[in-house]
Image: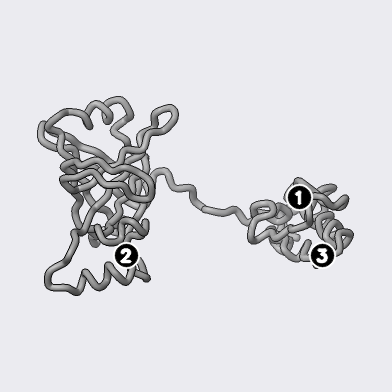
Amino acid sequence: MSPRPQIPTQAMLEKNLLATQGRWMWLYEVEVPTDPPTRYRFVRDPTEITFRGNVYSPFPITHSEVTENDQGDLPSLKMTASNASREIISVLNAHNGLVGQSCRIVLTHSLIIATSKSVWEEDFTILDTSANDKAVTCTLGDMNLYEAKLPGERMMRFYCRYEYKGGMCGYNVDPSHAAYLPTCDKSLNGLNGCKKHGDSEASAGVVAIHPERFGGFPGIPEPTTFGGLR
């Protein structure tokens, strides 16, 4: 939730001026789980704008500063939109208050919109919503702790945790070569495991990086029948 490390030069110059030649713009995107999903795009501005090929419609919407407390809660903010026309409340009623849906907030400037660059942008998850006759307020955060998968990874003795052919796996034999293996069973010594992929690399004439890239942990001890470890 921090500013981008490389703010566009023109935006930085505008920030430091006593009187800007353009205007700063807050853009909002909210995902609605229709079939297929619908992406609502709003701008806190009186005129419609186009940014990165998408049209943002004027709407009374704003958000608060990011807040933290001393209770160990994750940082969060409030996004508030007008409910005067009752358009938003009907969407909330139809889709469980949009809880769990993604939301993006972008800050850009009128002088850099054509470059598709932003000064700040962040993706959030809608954690909670509330509404009255005047406004709808959504609590936004990075994640919902109740839906978090813990632990994020399982360390296993003879099972690779890496995505096959991903950056950590690194298997890169040309698919047209006879030694190419299109799948992996994620084992170390299996019929289609990591060592077999090392043989495949050697046969294809590329550097054999398997099974050194195996994502399991053969050194993890396992319990024996009598309660010991081996």
Q: Which residue is mark 3?
A: 206
Residue 2 marker = 2
Disc 2 residue type (three-letter) = Ser
Residue 147 drawn at (x, y percent): 42, 43
Residue 225 marker = 1
Residue 30 drawn at (x, y percent): 32, 41
Residue at image x 21%, y 29%? 87
Displayed quadrant of residue 29: top left
Residue at image x 24%, y 53%? 26
For the question of whether residue 73 can be seen, the reply is no
Q: Earlier in the sequence, mark 2 or mark 3?
A: 2
Q: Earlier in the sequence, mark 1 or mark 2?
A: 2
Disc 3 residue type (three-letter) = Val
Disc 1 residue type (three-letter) = Thr
Closest to the camera, between mark 1 and mark 2, is 2
Crowd tier of the residue under label 1, counting other residues whose Cα lies within 10 Å: few below 14, some 14–19, many 20 or above: few
Q: Nearer the viewer, residue 26 or 68?
A: 26
Residue 47 drawn at (x, y percent): 19, 45
Q: CA distance from mark 3 to mark 1?
A: 43 Å
Q: Which element is circle 1 on? A: loop
Q: In the figure, is residue 124 to the left or right of 90? A: right
Q: Which element is circle 2 on? A: loop
Q: CA distance from mark 2 to mark 3?
A: 42 Å
Closest to the camera, between mark 3 and mark 1, is 3
Q: In the figure, is residue 77 to the left or right of 144? A: left
